[in-house]
Amino acid sequence: MTTTTAPKLKTSAMIASFVDPGQKTATAPFGHALVEAAAQNDKIVGLSADLAKYTDMHIFAAAFPDRFFQMGMAEQLLFGAAAGMAETGLIPFASTYSVFAARRAYDFLCLDIAEPELNVNIVGGLPGLTTGYGPSHQATEDIAIFRGMPNLTIVDPCDSVDISQAVPQLAASEGPTYLRVLRGKVATVLDEYDYTFELGKAKILHGGADVLFISSGLMTMRALQAAERLAADNIDVAVLHSPTIKPFDSQTVLAEMNTDRLVVTLENHTVIGGLFESVAAAATRVGLGKRVVPIGLPDQFLDAGALPTLHERYGLSTDRICATVRAELG
């Protein structure tokens, strides 16, 4: 009698992918984009708080070992050192997990980097619900924390195209920036659209007469998937991608909102203090009486588990997005 043993799963909740099977991807787009930018500008340096391998900074470290600085598990030191380097005219890219940048080192970021408007580029890994390791590593409120910091630019990229094009623009931006980086095998989505990343600008990717999706980050990928699926039900969905959360492109967003379409925001972040509230605030300021339906993470600490399960549970999956739109349209 013979027995068979099921293969041992080798996935990690820490580095789990939210990319669909068979989807086109690019490996470590941030790391490769930083190397390319650094080859053109010898002022660019890289730092990490013992997480280079997990934020794709190790690509830069291998290419430019003399321009990479491993600061150890000390986020306050990481950003203090980055500030000092920027004071001398260097252009630091400092990487750690988003939770550690936002929760552990806020004061250093605020007073050492943002207040003097130094060109320090904060690279945050595992943004929102991109890990199953639970509240200690899920940066579900990082944008809310950072939106109140003066002078700080916040970028939430959709895919490898966004990341690759954003890096040189962030390096050229004179003030501090925060990039919610997607790591490892990152989806390539926006190459199929007439799109280029432009810092501070939102872009229409897909037209539609019935519903307007306003999305950022990986949720733009889901918005496009949902739009395609809803088209089978004769629901015509437009997708407006807003990768820059601050400064917010109110002009483009309000122009698209000022129609009879159902407006839905989609974000990989709590509905408190992120894209939804940016959109709602922009509409309120100009007296646009428009209802906005938020799709995002709830105002609570999230469970640990497998990413597909968690995305379905908290409403970020394509199936859940489509169900929300159908329910709203009745």
Image: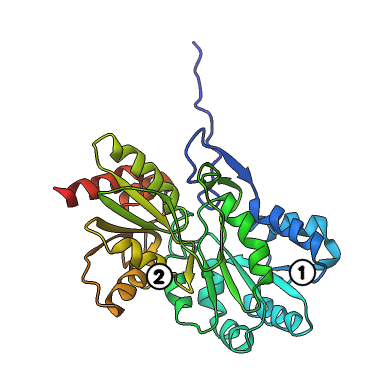
| Most distant residue in the left direction | 330
- Camera-nearest label, 2 or 1: 2
What amino acid does circle 1 point to? Val
Where residue 72 appears, as percent x and y from the top left, is 71, 70
Q: Secondary structure at mark 2?
A: helix
Q: Secondary structure at mark 1?
A: strand
The answer to whether residue 94 is seen in the rendering is: no
Where residue 184 appears, as percent x and y from the top left, is 61, 49
Q: Which residue is mark 1?
A: 45
Horizontal side of residue 184 vs 65, given as left or right: left
What residue do we see at 51% from left, 44% from top? 189
Tag of residue 243: none
Tag of residue 251: 2
What residue do we see at 64% from left, 68% from top? 170
- Which quarter of the picture shows residue 91? bottom right
Neighbour tally class for label 2: few under 14, some 14-19, many 20 plus, Cα within 10 Å: few
What residue do we see at 34% from left, 65% from top? 255
- Which quarter of the picture shows residue 54? bottom right
Neighbour tally class for label 1: few under 14, some 14-19, many 20 plus, Cα within 10 Å: many
What amino acid does circle 2 point to? Gln
Total tally of numbered discs in the picture: 2
Asked if the residue at tag 1 contacts the one at tag 2, i.e. Cβ–Cβ closer than 8 Å, the answer is no
Q: Observer-nearest residue: 262 or 178?
A: 262
Q: Is residue 236 above or below residue 143?
A: above
Q: Observer-nearest residue: 161 or 321?
A: 161
